[in-house]
Image: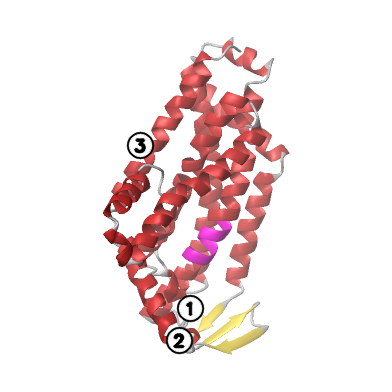
Amino acid sequence: MQFWALIVDSFRESRDRKIFWVILVMSGVIALAMASVRFDGDRVSFLFGLWERSSDYYNPLTGAGRSALVGGVVYLLLMFALGWVGIILTIIATAGFFPTMMERGTIDVLLSKPISRPRLFFYKYLSGMLFVLIQATVFVVLTFLVMGFRWGIWVPGYLMCIPLLVLLFSYLYCVSVLVAVRTRSAVAAILVSLAVWFLYACPNTALGVFQAYPDLQKHQRWYQAVRVLAWIPPKTGDIPYLAARWSQAGTSLDVFPEELMEGASMTDREQLDRARDLEEQELKKNPWVSIGSSLLFEVVIVFWGMWVFTRQDH
């Protein structure tokens, strides 16, 4: 009952800020836009038949066409709409959960009940995770059904995007909660979370540069230092590749028809081929190493936040 009461309270707060409904509407609009597209062999119609053009590349009856369509959803929609815009909105929606709970009067009532501070912290943390779980489930299930009934593409592995989106959010939410309990400021929690998202990506981006240009690997000391640094923070950049791997979507370059690449110079082609090779390597990574090391970092931050919360005077 205590857990449920905290969940209800968190949802009332997010509902009052309207962000909960904004994300739901965004998911519905994207699903409707997908439903307005229909594939009929080598013909593609948009806006429920108002505009039509020919395209063999996206024919869902072929293996390459299926991969390109699913890849478009995974890379272009899922990771942008719900992976960037959506995660930012959910961080904004949940950043005030702890500061609001820790206000004078509210926290006094909660602590007067038979519930320990660590349990109160943990329940409140889970309520934020449940908020995102519902949003991710709505979006993924809607787009899954559109791909199935409208395009004739059923990809059960695509449903794994639900826990992956929750994971992506949790990597940032743990920092948001830590900052929130230390500062009691939702604005600080939002700003630091977004800054940390950028910092998470820096070591892996640097490692990607070393891998893209093998000549740089002769600087072994720097290369090994970057590899160690890349292992420590959560691997937010791995989420699109894990989603693509379980959805059998191929690489992000597979989304674009080959004719778009025909005018590229030899140098550009070499760079594209190198980028494809690197993506294929990412797709072959052990997912449990990526998820396990990321969750280890998150657990440390969560227990740090819990320790701060339990030692504060309320």
Instruction: Give the residue displayed 66% in from the left and 38% down from the top.
Output: 14
Distance from the alpha carbon under mark 2 to that under mark 3: 44 Å
Residue assigned mark 1: 256
Residue assigned mark 3: 296
Instruction: Give the residue displayed 46% in from the left and 89% down from the top.
Output: 262
**In the rendered image, the vertical position of residue 300 relative to residue 287, given as above or below:** above
Residue assigned mark 2: 265
Amino acid type at image mark 3: Leu
**Would you say the residues marked 1 and 2 are in contact, meaning their CB atoms lie under 8 Å apart?**
no
Amino acid type at image mark 2: Ser
Instruction: Give the residue displayed 52% in from the left and 30% down from the top.
Output: 178
Q: Nearer the viewer, mark 2 or mark 3?
A: 2
Q: Secondary structure at mark 1?
A: loop
N-term mark: 1 or 2: 1
**In the rendered image, the vertical position of residue 34 relative to residue 190, given as above or below:** below
Q: Secondary structure at mark 2?
A: loop
Q: Residues within 10 Å of mark 1 (few under 14, many from 20)?
A: some
Figure label count: 3
Give the dominant element type of the magenta stretch: helix, strand or loop: helix
Amino acid type at image mark 1: Phe
Distance from the alpha carbon under mark 1 to that under mark 2: 17 Å
In the picture, measured across the screen, residue 105 lies left or right of residue 266, that is right
- Highlighted magenta segment, given as a residue range: 74-82
